[in-house]
Image: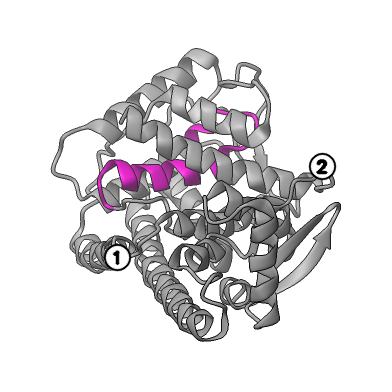
Amino acid sequence: MTFDPVTPYNNLPPLPPKAQVETSAVLKKAIGAARALAELKGLGQTIPNQAMLVDSLVLQEAKDSSAIESIFTTNDVLFRSFAAKTSHIDAATKEVLRYREALWEGFRTLKVRPVLSTNLLVDIVQKIKENSAGIRNVPGTAIANGTTGEIIYTPPDGEEVLHDKLANLEQFMHADDAMEPLVKLALIHYQFEAIHPFTDGNGRTGRVLGILFLTYKGLLDLPVLYLSRYIIEHKHDYYVLLRNVTEKGAWEPWILYMLDAVEQMSIMTRGRIVAIRALMGQTMERAKKELPTRVYSKELIELLFRQPYTKSRFLVEAGIAERKTASAYLQELEHIGVLRAQKMGTEVLYLNTGLYDLLSQ
């Protein structure tokens, strides 16, 4: 089958591919990736308050996934904006925060109704883009080289065609077959990006889909795998390998790339969780020694590790203290050097400097 980059790729082959994708090299690599992912899942189960992993690590994934699409914000702006109640947030940061919410909402939806459906993908992209757009129904979508302007890929065209290809993708994701799930992850990611069903937000929606697939298959309990960082660090290879699948049917290098991403980012994320847990333990010991007994509680310290910035309202909502007492508790933590106060609008935010430094590495 010949491929023409300027012609809509309506002949995009369905999944599974006719080619042999579970080669010996792929299956060997899949063993290491699956082991690393299982260790990450197991470690996550040892965290007493798993919400802290969602709020801190998912924000990092949101930032990096958006950066792949040239939507940039900084760690500090992102963390402050997530904690603060303010309308003074730049457009890029708002979009990153919406990505985080789309991922989390998709995860919650999947828990209630464990189906990876086209409707779920539409909900995700609408949340990310904050609009009501659905499947593309206007012709003319093409992907061009950012430097030369040359068209390098034209995705399938026609709403009915797109729905048919998404239906095949759904069937493949839910098929009860013997294919290694991490190999399926690589195929799913390619296929969704090749279908390119939305006018915008396909890359981010595709990365959300990948993380949700891992939770759907029970390979993760929480959507905390940090794949976007790997893609940023190997961005040239990412696009070349995707293109080589389309133009040459070169599945093995692409699948090996994705398996390496899962393995390396599972190891990295696991190391980050270990470091967060160790820092939280050190902070608890320090707080026990240096805080008045009326202030210290395990719940208070755990709250400080939900995200780098906190404020008195968070303590009130968690049932740790009343409003005035909450402010006093945070001031005590600032006094011993655990937190640092910052004014943002009419609010005072308190930065957990150790957690911020760890997440910024």
Q: Secondary structure at mark 1?
A: loop
Q: Nearer the viewer, residue 3 or 142?
A: 142
**What residue is disc 1 on?**
46
> Could you tell me which quadrant the C terminus lies in?
bottom right
Q: Nearer the viewer, residue 166 or 67?
A: 67
Residue 196 included in the magenta stretch of the image: yes
Is residue 17 placed above or below 287 in the rendered structure?
above
Residue 348 at x, y percent in the picture: 78, 60
Which SS does the magenta portion mostly show? helix
Query: How many callouts does the rendering have?
Result: 2
Residue 88 at x, y percent in the picture: 84, 46
Q: Earlier in the sequence, mark 2 or mark 1?
A: 1
Q: Residue 87's mark?
A: 2
Residue 139 included in the magenta stretch of the image: no
Residue under the image location 48 percent in, 25 percent down: 10
Residue 40 at x, y percent in the picture: 32, 65
> Could you tell me which quadrant the N terminus lies in?
top left
| Residue situated furthest front in the rendering | 294
Is residue 199 placed above or below 96 in the rendered structure?
above
| Residue situated furthest left in the rendering | 178
Residue under the image location 41 percent in, 46 percent down: 210
Is residue 207 placed above or below 166 in the rendered structure?
below
Query: Are the residues tagged 2 and 1 within 8 Å (C-beta)?
Result: no
The part of the chain drawn in magenta is 194-219
| Residue situated furthest top in the rendering | 160
In the image, taking residue 323 as reference, residue 1 lies left or right, namely left
- Residue 120 falls in image quadrant: top left
Residue under the image location 51 percent in, 60 percent down: 57
Q: Secondary structure at mark 2?
A: loop
- What whole-number distance in Å separates the C-alpha atoms at marks 2 and 1? 37 Å
